Image (cartoon, rainbow, N blue to C red):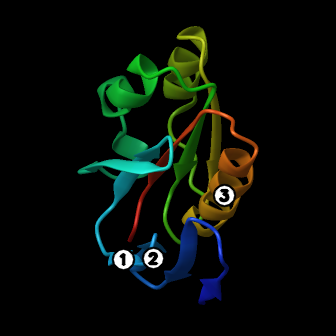
């Protein structure tokens, strides 16, 4: 499925995300409308608190976790650890996370999007 719009994340197609005119095939982290880093991550079920280090150290109010083509929830204990750190987290498929990022960032709110592109 392909989705296009005129926001910062402009399109999402199988295995790639178009951000500010450039197609990315790897997973990455977005913060304050900039790509912070490509993101090497394990499978969702194997995510650990260390995989969220950047987001937890940032001054974001919300973490969006895009888990690829399907919404897959990480371990509930991991989600609890993130909440205990004072960060909100929303888990959704990557297409939904991209749309949500565009909306939240257009409201000038501080959000980290951790987008799995698989």
Report the disc number at residue 68.
none
Report the disc number at residue 22.
1
- Please provide percent x and percent y for residue 109: 68, 35
The residue tagged 2 is: 18
The residues bearing labels 3 and 1 have C-alpha atoms spaced at a distance of 16 Å
Q: Is residue 28 left or right of residue 81?
A: left
- Judged from this view, the residue extending furthest toward the bottom is 1
Q: In the rendered structure, are the residues bearing label 3 and label 1 in contact, judged by CB atoms less than 8 Å apart? A: no
* Most foreground residue, 55 or 107: 107
- Please provide percent x and percent y for residue 34: 41, 49
Q: Secondary structure at mark 3?
A: helix
**Which sits earlier in the primary sequence, circle 3 or circle 1?**
1
**Position of 42 relative to 77 (above/below):** below
- Please provide percent x and percent y for residue 22: 36, 76
* Most foreground residue, 52 or 106: 106
Give the total number of marks visible in the rendering: 3
**Position of 109 relative to 25 (above/below):** above
Q: In the rendered structure, are the residues bearing label 1 and label 2 in contact, judged by CB atoms less than 8 Å apart? A: yes
The residue tagged 3 is: 102
Residue shown at 40% from the left, 67% from the top = 117
**Which sits earlier in the primary sequence, circle 3 or circle 2?**
2
Residue shown at 50% from the left, 49% from the top = 33
The residues bearing labels 1 and 2 have C-alpha atoms spaced at a distance of 5 Å
Q: In the rendered structure, are the residues bearing label 3 and label 2 in contact, judged by CB atoms less than 8 Å apart? A: no
Q: Is residue 26 left or right of residue 34?
A: left
Q: Secondary structure at mark 2?
A: strand
Quadrant position of residue 18: bottom left
């Amino acid at each position: 499925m392909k989705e296009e719009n005129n926001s910062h994340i402009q399109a999402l197609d199988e295995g790639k995300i178009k951000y500010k005119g450039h197609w990315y095939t790897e997973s990455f982290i977005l913060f304050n409308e900039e790509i912070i880093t490509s993101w090497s991550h394990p499978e969702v079920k194997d995510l650990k608190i260390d995989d969220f280090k950047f987001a937890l150290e940032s001054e974001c109010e919300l973490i969006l976790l895009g888990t690829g083509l399907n919404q897959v929830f990480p371990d509930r204990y991991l989600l609890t650890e993130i909440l205990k750190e004072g960060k909100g987290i929303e888990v959704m498929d990557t297409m939904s996370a991209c749309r949500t990022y565009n909306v939240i960032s257009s409201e000038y709110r501080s959000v980290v999007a951790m987008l799995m592109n698989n």
